[in-house]
Image (spheres, coloured by chain):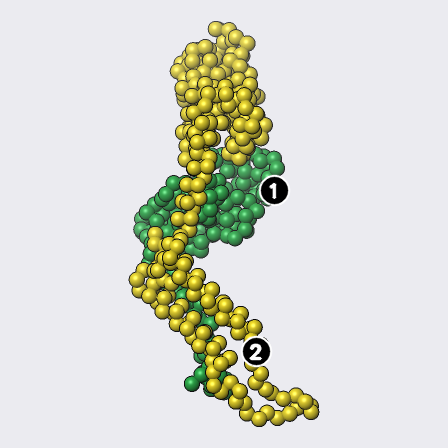
Amino acid sequence: MNAVDLHRRLERNSGWLIFGILFVSAIGGLVQVLPSVLDDSLATPAADAKPYGPVELTGRDIYIRESCGVCHSQQVRPLLAEVRRYGPFSKAGEFAFDRPFLWGSKRTGPDLHRIGGRYSDVWHRLHLLDPRAVVPDSIMPAYPWLGERAADAEGAIQAKMRALRRLGHPYTDAEIDAAPAALEGLTEVDALVAYLQGLGTPGGDAR
Amino acid sequence: MAELPGAFWGGWVLVLTVGSLVGLGWVVFSVYFGSGRDEHEASPVWDGNLQEGAHPAPLWWFWLLFGSLVISVVYLMLYPGLGALGGAFEWSQGGELRERQERYATEFGPTRRLVAEAELETLRADPGLMASAQRVYDRNCATCHGYDARGQADLFPDLRDAEWQWGGDPAQIEQSIRHGRQAVMVGWLPVVGEETVDALTDYVLALADGAPAEHPGAQPYTLYCSACHGPDGAGNPLLGASNLLDDISLYGNSAEAIRHSIAVGREGEMPAFADRLDDTQIRLLVAWLTAR
């Protein structure tokens, strides 16, 4: 038995050939992907990771809708320059309640994973509605409509939280019942600022 | 947070990786050197000269594959890759970062400590250090206070004038940078009513030129405002209560802006930078900000 014989036998039976191709192409995934999906140590929330509240969750969806992730990443890599600039590097457990995670892959603007608390709320509000008002040479687009729309215009917050609960986020009934009230009277920019200010509780070792 | 997989998945990765490497080696070797490689059924001839054959790929191709296998095996022995085995170098991303941080500390630590403990005068006299300070400022402070440190948006204070809401001593400035400031001016409209708010606005505008004692705003000022802003309106840096005697008003000098401050109130927030800047950077900033 050698590889040439084996190949000859495989290529004459399409069933075996298909199986052989699938098996060989699956090895990489079996080694790389399967353990990271099934090994609990990577999916365990970091000690200070907590599920997003209704306001932050709405802000996160606005962040996704406005494609902030196209220009801003949310992952501080374990490199000296990044750790000194942004703060402690990102760990897997910090993203346990991010569905989907918003790591991003391109930095036209700065990384945002440690942005929380760096600026005041009022700065964020001004900057989101018109970035040039505070940073004259900014190339970030302005998002003036965020200040006009109601945060919970769709009224979908309870459905979102229930869907996430089904996926394992520990929301209580009381939290879900109280969610619409928490969004009452807030505009989209309020929700987005709350989300941004919640980003970046450093998960562990200092810089 | 585990950097390497646990026992079961570690074994899984190990078996699959080693198994696929062995399988690959077997395929490569038997294609080149195994029996049966030359056997080939007679093939029909097309177009007079086209015939299916079994020429092996050139030998340099074999060495390429063999070389890749050897490199893979050596790599897996040195670096983490085989499940829970960390490799001979015991390399990890976190470890690499720590090593670089240590190297950074050894190389720059002593100089940085000198700066952190230096007299402000000495720092101000060094143009190189002041250029560094300006870079720290541009990177961390300019987004709110502006690149020229003149403040902006009628919200973020001017850092170049003589007026410091929370005090302009180096120690007070350092405190502001390190721990941030939370300024609260409550709105007085619900308490005092429209008329008094108007009177107070007029009084505050007149204070700079010495408002007369019989001014209609004088009495409510003493009653409601003097506790924080002082009986004479000079302010109190301990509370972040602004000086009302000068013509510098953070939220704007217009009667409208001042009336809004009195009626609705203001909330100012300076974030804390103790976790974002180190002692050296803060010392440089204080020196730069107090240079005139």
Chain A shown in which color? green
Residue hosting label 1: A139
Residue B101 drawn at (x, y percent): 43, 41
How many tags in the picture?
A: 2
Q: Secondary structure at mark 1?
A: loop
What residue is drawn where x is 44% and y is 41%? B103
**Above or below: residue B279 compared with residue B125:** below
Residue A169 x %, y %: 35, 54
**Chain bearing mark 1:** A
Q: Which residue occupies the extreme right position in the image?
A: B48
**Quarter of the picture holding the C terminus of chain A:** top left
In the rendered view, tell whether residue A107 sits above or below residue B113: below
Say which of B25 and B222 sits in front.
B25
Residue at the location (43% across, 29% down)? Answer: B113
Amino acid type assigned to the residue bearing label 1 in the image? Ile
- Residue count near mark 1 (Cα–Cα under 10 Å), binned few <14, some 14–19, many ≥20: few
Q: Colour of chain B?
A: yellow
Whether marks 2 and 1 lie on the same chain: no
- Mark 2 — residue? B57
Measured in 3D between alpha carbons, the distance from the residue under mark 2 to the one under mark 1, in whole angstroms, is 54 Å
* Residue at image location 37% in from the left, 43% down from the top: A205
Is any part of residue A184 visible from this angle?
Answer: no
Question: B216 left or right of A176?
Answer: right
Q: Quadrant of the N terminus of chain A?
A: bottom left
